[in-house]
Image (cartoon, grey):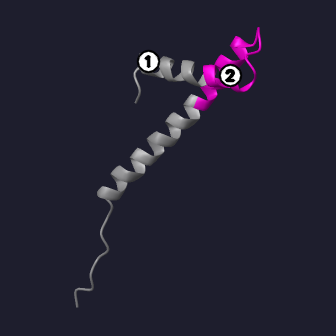
Amino acid sequence: MASKDSAQREIRKIAYALWMEQGQPDGRDREHWEAAKVIWAFRNHENQDRDSELKAGSHAARPLTDRR
């Protein structure tokens, strides 16, 4: 999980990118910040899911062999 400081840095980068993409409009900083938080949370959740799948895969049950 990301530290609070690294999360804030990433959110700031995303918000800045949104602001730039939208032509640097005045007075929409809160909108960009909130959108950036949603984007960051989605990305972070995807990464956690991927990490969980990788960990589960390394400990996945192996098929039983026929012991006749």
Around disc 2, counting alpha carbons within 10 Å, would you say few (fewer than 14), some (14 to 19), or many (20 or more)?
A: few
Q: How many labels does the image show?
A: 2
Q: Label 2's element?
A: helix
Name the residue at 43% across, 16% down: 5
In the image as oriented, which residue stretches furthest toward the left? 67
Position in image of residue 56 (x %, y %): 36, 54
Residue name at image x 56 percent, y 18 percent: 12
User: In the image, is residue 32 part of the stretch drawn in magenta?
Assistant: yes
Reading the image, the residue beneath label 1 is: 4
In the picture, the quarter occupied by the C terminus is: bottom left
Q: Quadrant of residue 3?
A: top left
Quadrant, the N terminus: top left
Q: Where is residue 19 in the image (x, y as percent from the top left)?
A: 69, 20
Q: Is residue 26 above or below residue 33?
A: above
Q: Give the range drawn in magenta.
A: 15-39
Q: Position of residue 33 (x, y in %)?
A: 64, 17
Taking the image as shown, residue 67 lies to the left or right of residue 57, namely left
Q: Nearer the viewer, mark 1 or mark 2?
A: 2
Amino acid type of disc 2?
A: Met
Residue with the mark numbered 2: 20
Classify mark 1: helix, strand or loop: helix
Q: In this view, does 31 lie above or below 53?
A: above
Q: How far apart in space, not on screen, are marks 1 and 2 (Cα)? A: 24 Å
Choose top left, top right, bottom left or bottom right for residue 14. Answer: top right
Determine contact: label 1, label 2, CB under 8 Å.
no
Q: Image point 22% across, 86% down: which residue?
A: 67
Residue 43 belongs to magenta span: no
How packed mark 1 is, by other alpha carbons closer than 10 Å (few <14, some 14-19, many 20 or more), is few
